[in-house]
Image (cartoon, rainbow, N blue to C red):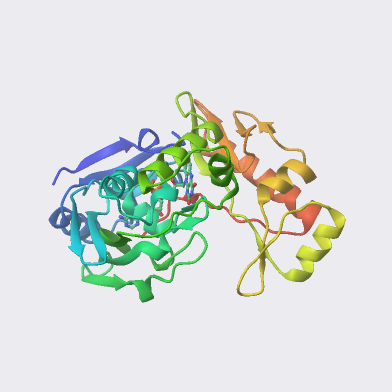
Amino acid sequence: MNVETSVPLAPLTTFRIGGLARVYIPIHTEEEAESAVALARDRGLPLFVLGAGSNILIPDSGFDGVVLHMQMREMTIEDRGEHAELIAGAGALWEDVVDAACVHGLHGIENLAGIPGTLGGAAVQNIGAYGAEFAPVFAYADVLDSTTGAKRRITKEEALFAYRTSTFKQHSELVITRIALTLKKNASLHTQYADLAQVVESGVALATPADVAKVVRAIRARKFPAGKDEGTAGSFFKNPIITQALAASLVEQFPGLPTFPLENGMVKIPLAWILDHVLSLKGYAKGPVRLYEKQPLVLVAQAGARSADVDALANDICARVYEATQITIEREVETISAR
Ligand SMILES: Cc1cc2nc3c(=O)[nH]c(=O)nc-3n(C[C@H](O)[C@H](O)[C@H](O)COP(=O)(O)OP(=O)(O)OC[C@H]3O[C@@H](n4cnc5c(N)ncnc54)[C@H](O)[C@@H]3O)c2cc1C
């Protein structure tokens, strides 16, 4: 196990913001994960698990504890008759997982192509895009409880996936080491989502999961910042889920506001629409951080921006949204916290 100290975390995140890790350990095997967890416990230091750093804002003060950087990337695909099981290390890059599924003609995650991050991060966040979510393909995860060092298997029922959350997010003591996905050999493709439907209507034939993944990546490339000179962690806030009464009064106040009724009687509304049509905040900047011109839910940070700059803009946006709509919005991007 390779243990380093005072390691800059900013380059390990897509925001490219944040200070040093007191202790940094790259994790390539389950044994290394166990040793790293034991080291943190022995030294009485908090622990943080880092994937590809694409949904995290690291404070300027860094992290005064042990960062486990997940690099476990082995992957196998096993035939189970009507479906296949893809089993991979939690540090496997999500794009590699999608590619492996597509190469084998397996269905279920093609609409999630192009999302940065690791397989572990995908489970924590229950990633979603283009009408699909991670939850339906999840079979199980092998985890290490960092408080006890015990190993366990979390089943689909125990994972408690919901909009951008899961058991793994609620129980940050769990270090995911391996995940299994159930992928279908035959299934219909989901191309109803507006952007995909437009492509189909324009005459492009989408026959395989690989076809869908290719189109989704092309659509995404037009929507997100290219990321070479600027940092981002994608959508910074969650879309709010509100009561029917509040949704009805907002639709009256702001005609055209799209609403998406949920099974539990609540209503999801697109925050980007509010930021754009109600508050006219596309491109709104505070210092080196701004709301992306093409998608105001995305915060973009210029090189040299600090986490305090991101917090300042994010808090400003929360206050403006509340003032206009009485909605308290929540961050989708996490701030590093101790385990
Ligand atoms: C340009 C861009 C576009 C994006 N688009 C989307 C999108 O369309 N849909 C969407 O849902 N998300 C999107 N995201 C957000 C992000 O890609 C996902 O949330 C991704 O799954 C995060 O994975 P990660 O490995 O980078 O996690 P990190 O950012 O490294 O970590 C996120 C959280 O997961 C925890 N974690 C990571 N790995 C493990 C593990 N092995 N065990 C325990 N905990 C772990 C971390 O401790 C942290 O709490 C986007 C981000 C960017 C930058």
Q: Could you tell me residue 265's position as x and y percent?
A: 66, 74
- Residue 239 picture quarter: bottom right
Looking at the image, which residue is at 75% across and 47% down? 320
Looking at the image, which residue is at 50% across and 26% down? 304
Query: Is 219 or 46 nearer to us in this picture?
Result: 219
Query: Is 133 or 325 nearer to us in this picture?
Result: 133
Looking at the image, which residue is at 41% across and 58% down? 134
- Residue 266 picture quarter: bottom right
Q: Is residue 230 visible?
A: yes
Say whether residue 29 is left or right of residue 139. left
* Above or below 230: residue 142: below
* Above or below 262: residue 214: above
Q: Is residue 18 visible?
A: no
Query: Is 22 or 303 nearer to us in this picture?
Result: 303
Q: Could you tell me residue 286's position as x and y percent?
A: 66, 32
* Above or below 282: residue 329: below
Q: Could you tell me residue 103's position as x and y percent?
A: 27, 45
Say whether residue 297 is left or right of residue 219. right
* Above or below 280: residue 261: below
Say whether residue 168 is left or right of residue 259. left
